[in-house]
Structure formats: C-alpha cells, structure tokens
Image: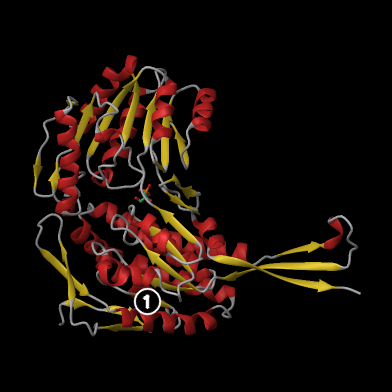
C-alpha cells in the first residue's frame, strides 16, 4: 500500500509482511492523517540481527569519522526542517514555530553530541597500583569506555524528533547500534528524521526504525535478549518496562508534577509570566510544564490576577496558525484532563475562566483554591490546565513537593537567593529552577527525575557516558 509509510531496517525502507498498518489521527481534525507499518516480531528479530552485525563494524570506525557522519546528519536534518515540522504539526498538533524549533534544536543536539563524544570518548585514564596499601608500582591500569551494543530508543509523542535524537546521537557517537520505536503520534516525523540519518551514510543496519502496535512488539522489543540498553521517555509504561527488562542499563524519564513555589517577596510579574509560559506552552504537554502553583496566601490574589491577565492573551486554535493553545494529542487525553477538571469542580475549586472543550481542543484554564484532596493537586493533566494551591508557609510548599510520587523538576520564585538555595536543597526533585519555569534545556544540562519520574540522568554528556561501559587493561610489570 503506497499510502503506508515504510519502516526502516537493514539500510532500506520496507513494507511489513504483516500486511497491517496503524492509523495516526490528526489531533486537530480527529481524522486519519497518516498510516504506518505494523511490524511483526520476526521483523524486530531481523532488525536486531542486522544491528548487531553493523555495530561490530561501527565500533571500530574511527571516532572522528563517527562524529563526522553525525555532523552530516545534523546538517541534513536542518535542511529538512520544514517538511519534518509539517509532520509534527499534523501528527501532534504542535504549533508550527515550535515544531521548527524542535527540529533545529535536534540538529544542534546531534552536532553538540558529536563534539562532546570526541572529547569524552577520546580520552582514557591510567591508574597506578602503588596508591593502594601494600602495593608496589608494578601495575598500570588503562581505563577506556566501550559501547554497550544495541540501544533501544523509545521517545514520547511530545518531542518525536528531539527526544529521539537525544537518545540516537549519544548511542551512535559511543559506537552503539540503535533501534528506534517511535511513538504512534509522531512516528511519521520520526521516519523523516531517520531518513536524514539514512542520507548521512551510516552503515546499513546500524539504525532501524520499527513502527507498530505496542501491544504486539512493545514487550518483545523491551525484553529482547539482543537489546543492551533502553532509553525511554514517556508515562508509567516505563515502570512496567523496568520490571520486565533484563540486566541492562536503563535510562528513563516518566513525567513530572513540577511545582512552582511563589514566595511573598517574589517578582510577581516574572512569576506570572513563567507560570503562563511554563504551564501553557505546547498546551501543557511537557514533562517539565508547570503543573502546580504553590503560592503564599498573602500574594495569591495578586499573582492569580496577573496570570489570568496574561492568559487572556493566549491564542487558541490551529497549530498551522501558530496558536498558543492547540488540540491535545488524543481524545482519551482530552477526556482524562476533563476528568481532573470535573473532580476539582465537584470538590469546590475556583475556576478563573469558564471550562471549555471542543473535540480535543481545551481552552486554557487556571484552577484556584485547589486542595490536597483534589486529583489536580497530585496528577499531571498533560494539558492546558494549571492548578493553584494557596499555602501559608514555605514548609507547606516543600512538603507538597516532596509528598508527590513524581519528582522531575520544580521552581521557586523569590528575591532572596539564600532562601532560594535553602528551598532548593529541601525540594526532593531532579532539578530546581530559581526564578524561572522548569525546563530540560539547554540539552547538555543534566536532566533527571527522582522517585517515579525516572532512573538515570540524561543530558548529552550523561547520556554518552550511560551508553558506554568501562573496559580496563592492566599492564603487569616484573
Ligand atoms: O516532556 C519532555 C521533557 O523532556 C520536556 O522538555 O525541553 O520542554 O523542557 P522541555
């Protein structure tokens, strides 16, 4: 079927022998937009086999050459930014300008990764034995970093290109092969991105892009004995994967309930601007979105008013028109968000705007006077809804942050830097931003979640290190 996007394995674009496809609905129109191949387990086996063969050659390819090929892929990706962004707009309803930014950011990530890889993999370490008690200086230990083998990358829908390359580029520079299982929404953008790697001239089989139904190939891929590392970004499926995966390194980012603590001495204009940007960009569908405002009661009225004023300027509509608020990714997501909103309404929260939803499009909503017995206080909407809890002490805010099972990022707004540092120390979350909304980038910064928000630390340097293992050679002198 010509209309079905092919999957990529063994250096070629292929039609699955299953004869089946998966339909991708456009979130804005809720009509079928694209079709992708529903790959079989046998096709997964073949991709893993050719990845294994290609990896042994790639690992011996000089580091400078691996870097050069990655730089080439980055340049090709930038050249194709318009067409790839076009897919992102249709598949996940990301505003066009943000989709372009995602592609450009991804190309920059690949280039930075190539450079960083050359630096950190290009140098080893030597230890001498006489530093340990009882030893003479007769042993020298050469330490180097070698690839793991095959890395399985599973990115989420919200950054189908950027969170794919943040796994692909470190894996490849470190000498690994890469199997990509793109998210269903975002798979076609992923396919176009993989084609840029294809054009850059990586060895046949080194990269594959296996599309299909999670129910058929999800567990098969994550439990595959040929896979040596899994890098996953998404929801709590990651917890299930971690229970089933073998004895291999796992890197996971599984969402956040990022709190924004606003103190009495905060610059309230700055806080309000960051709450709107952090809470509503890409309609709140970011793991690092502001998902709960914890504001001191004494400044709450002023802050809420400022946030509401800024929210009234948000444009609502089509991603093609660069509207700020666009349809959320699926109907089930829209219904889930509505469930959280209904719960808050029934339990007596204050709605700062009228709740409105048409299809998958949800109008931005600030929900004030949220209390801990409401679902919105703990669950992530992953939509354009921001709850506000009024607090009477800083300790109350820190306690709420630490009581959440999710702990990706958080932020604190205050003019008192000493207080900010003390609060940051007390917040048990992966990253604390002082006087700015949570955010993953720049992409070389460490990025990690605590508790159910994930395992391992990402960011370019950490990912390269995580996708290698240590190898030592000991020289024994007479
Ligand atoms: O939701 C994905 C998460 O990694 C957010 O990234 O760049 O929007 O902070 P960013």
Residues 403 and 386: in front is 403
Scheme of image coloration: secondary structure
State whether label 1 is within 8 Å of ligand 1: no
Above or below, 122 against 453 in this view is below
Circle 1: element type: strand
Q: Residue at x 43, y 84 (%)?
A: 50
Above or below, 218 against 199 in this view is above
| Label 1 crowd bin: few (<14), some (14–19), many (20+), radius 10 Å | many
Q: Quadrant of the N terminus?
A: bottom left
Lateral position of residue 225 relative to residue 335, left or right: right
Pointer 1 residue = 208
Quarter-of-image position of residue 29: bottom left
- Whether residue 313 appears in this view of the structure is no
Q: Residue at x 50, y 21 (%)?
A: 416
Lateral position of residue 236 relative to residue 440, left or right: left
Find residue 380 and report its horizontal and vertical position in percent. Answer: 29, 42
Q: Quadrant of the C terminus?
A: bottom right
- Whether residue 256 appears in this view of the structure is yes
Residues 364 and 213: in front is 213
Find residue 120 and report its horizontal and vertical position in percent. Answer: 61, 62
Q: Residue at x 33, y 25 (%)?
A: 269
Residue farthest to the top?
298
Lateral position of residue 42 relative to residue 223, left or right: left
Residues 236 and 125: in front is 236
Q: Residue at x 43, y 83 (%)?
A: 49
Above or below, 448 against 140 in this view is above
Find residue 293 and report its horizontal and vertical position in percent. Answer: 32, 30
Above or below, 264 against 233 in this view is above
């Amino acid at each position: 079927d010509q209309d079905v996007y092919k999957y990529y394995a063994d250096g070629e674009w292929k039609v699955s022998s299953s004869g089946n496809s998966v339909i991708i609905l456009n979130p804005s129109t809720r009509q079928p937009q694209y079709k992708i191949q529903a790959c079989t387990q046998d096709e997964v086996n073949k991709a893993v086999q050719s990845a294994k063969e290609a990896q042994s050659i790639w690992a011996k390819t000089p580091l400078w050459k691996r870097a050069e090929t990655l730089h080439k892929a980055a340049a090709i990706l930038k050249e194709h930014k318009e067409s790839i962004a076009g897919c992102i707009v249709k598949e996940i309803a990301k505003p066009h300008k943000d989709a372009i930014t995602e592609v450009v950011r991804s190309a920059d990530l690949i280039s930075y990764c190539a450079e960083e890889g050359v630096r950190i993999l290009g140098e080893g370490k030597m230890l001498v034995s006489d530093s340990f008690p009882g030893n003479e200086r007769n042993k020298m230990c050469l330490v180097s970093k070698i690839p793991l083998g095959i890395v399985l990358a599973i990115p989420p829908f919200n950054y189908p290109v950027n969170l794919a390359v943040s796994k692909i580029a470190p894996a490849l520079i470190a000498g690994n092969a890469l199997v990509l299982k793109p998210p269903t929404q975002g798979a076609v953008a992923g396919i176009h991105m993989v084609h840029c790697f294809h054009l850059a001239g990586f060895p046949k089989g080194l990269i594959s892009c296996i599309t299909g139904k999670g129910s058929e190939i999800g567990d098969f891929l994550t439990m595959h004995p040929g896979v040596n590392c899994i890098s996953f970004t998404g929801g709590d499926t990651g917890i299930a994967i971690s229970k089933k995966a073998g004895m291999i390194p796992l890197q996971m980012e599984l969402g956040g309930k990022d709190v924004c603590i606003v103190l009495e001495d905060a610059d309230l204009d700055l806080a309000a601007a960051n709450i709107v940007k952090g809470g509503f960009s890409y309609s709140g569908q970011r793991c690092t979105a502001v998902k709960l405002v914890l504001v001191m009661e004494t400044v709450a009225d002023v802050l809420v008013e400022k946030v509401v004023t800024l929210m009234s300027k948000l444009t609502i509509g089509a991603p093609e028109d660069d509207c700020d608020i666009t349809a959320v990714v699926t109907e089930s997501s829209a219904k889930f968000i509505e469930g959280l909103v209904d719960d808050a309404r029934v339990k007596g929260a204050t709605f700062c705007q009228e709740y409105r939803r048409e299809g998958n499009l949800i109008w931005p909503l600030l929900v004030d006077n949220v209390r801990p017995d409401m679902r919105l206080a703990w669950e992530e909407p992953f939509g354009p809804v921001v709850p506000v809890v009024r607090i009477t002490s800083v300790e109350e805010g820190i306690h709420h942050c630490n009581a959440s099972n999710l702990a990706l990022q958080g932020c604190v707004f205050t003019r008192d830097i000493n207080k900010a540092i003390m609060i940051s120390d007390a917040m048990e979350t992966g990253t604390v931003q002082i006087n700015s909304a949570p955010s993953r980038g720049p992409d070389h910064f460490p990025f990690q979640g605590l508790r159910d928000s994930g395992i391992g630390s990402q960011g370019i340097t950490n990912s390269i290190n995580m996708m290698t293992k240590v190898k030592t050679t000991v020289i024994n002198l007479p």
